[in-house]
Image (cartoon, rainbow, N blue to C red):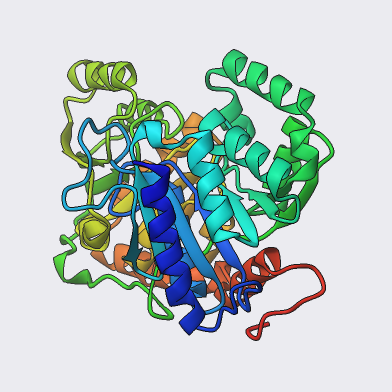
Amino acid sequence: MTAARATRGIREECARGAARGWDGSRILRPRVLVVVSTYLPGVKGGGHIRSISALATHLGDELDPFVICGDRDSGDESAYPNIRVGEWTLVGNAQVMYLSRSGFSTKLYQTVLAELRPDVLYLNTVFSVREIIVPAMVARRRYPSVRIIVAPRGCLNPGALALKRKKKLVFLRALRWSRLPKSLIWQASSETEALSIRDAIGKVDTVVASNLPMVTGSVMVQASPKNRPSKASGKLEIIFLSRISPMKNLEYLLKRLANVRGEIDLTIAGPVEDVSYWAQCEKLFARRLSHVSVRQIGSVAHDDVASVLASHHIFVLPTRGENFGHVILEAFDAGLGVVVSDRTPWRGLEQLGAGWDLPLENPLAWEHVLQTCCDMDGRALETMSAAAKSATAALFDVDAAKHANLALFYPAGTSPNAL
């Protein structure tokens, strides 16, 4: 991609923006430039794809979002078909520019920032030179008035930092030495994540604004239960839907299932992010899980997630840490009881009757709960399913999250109409 090509695309988009109310020098709605490794139509990149697309869906009328992202899904060798690399394309409520890996360059950031003149630069990782260091340094040197917001997306939580710890600590040490973090605004999805950010980065400006859920219009996506299998005591159909990596902790679930009695079907959905870790999991299938039927279906398209979830009895995710956990809410909306670790924002599930949030340090508790689910009859499962469908409303205030995100993106001293 050439800088001239990018410039033409930006100028054309700015001209279209003027017709929507931009006056050329001042933007009535904040123009937000999002930098992220993977975006739609990708599905392998994790929750940040859902977080950003949900932000654009919910707040597309209050913000002008522009997204710079890679031209392929996470781990793929080839680019998405039928995309225009290096040009702005309308995807949902956001203008999106797909780039090759070499496209994330200093020159590209200089060109885009000069032509787009965003109010906010929104970065969505920590451990990437090309996606945080380079754009932040270019913006700070040339456009000091641009507000730079960093959403770590859970990568500074203790569970995430424990993986490849030495390499990450070296990066964080260099980042702190640069003094760049103190000039940025750090978005946390919860007070717990805000504490993790300060523990990892130091005394920095943190703002709590929860991620937004995936939606259709203004209504949470609800899956039809028509495909849900019947439930008999002693039989259990489980789905694990997440990236296959040490962070998502599939191996822990397999070890727990080894001690659960009954006829168990386990569907593993999601991309293999760590090949060696997946090999460890496969060894467990062969050695210890003769009573468990395991089916791996790979990545699931966003539009198919609800129906895939709804065709099982329960959703299980023994994650080492989630700053939000979109798939957990999607499981609730599909009417599935969930069994997750206590390292997500979704707590108190047993009191709601919608599932369990359990400490990883207590494997016997996990085995007891999984046995309880296996022993359930159809009536008990339907009771839990009804509670799960109500759990999102009980646990999460969408309007409050929208307000917090709008306040994050609007300049201090101003207020959007929606607030």
Can you name the residue that lies furthest to the front here?
4
Q: Image quadrant for the N terminus?
A: top left
Name the foreground residue: 338 vs 61: 61
Q: Position of residue 394 (x, y in %)?
A: 55, 72
Residue located 22% across and 40% down the image: 79
Q: Is residue 184 left or right of residue 76?
A: right
Q: Image quadrant for the C terminus?
A: bottom right
Residue located 56% across and 44% down the image: 110
Name the foreground residue: 389 vs 320: 320
Q: Position of residue 76 (x, y in %)?
A: 25, 33
Query: Is residue 193 shown above or below 56?
Result: above
Which quadrant of the view contains residue 288?
top left
Is there any visible trace of residue 128 in the rendered image?
A: no
Q: Is residue 229 left or right of residue 239?
A: left
Query: Is residue 150 shown above or below 212?
Result: above
Q: Position of residue 75 (x, y in %)?
A: 29, 31
Which quadrant of the view contains residue 229?
bottom left
Query: Is residue 82 shown above or below 380?
Result: above
Query: Is residue 231 shown above or below 159?
Result: below
Residue located 69% across and 64% down the image: 408
Is there any visible trace of residue 10 in the rendered image?
A: yes
Residue located 54% across and 84% down the image: 21
Q: Position of residue 271 (x, y in %)?
A: 27, 36
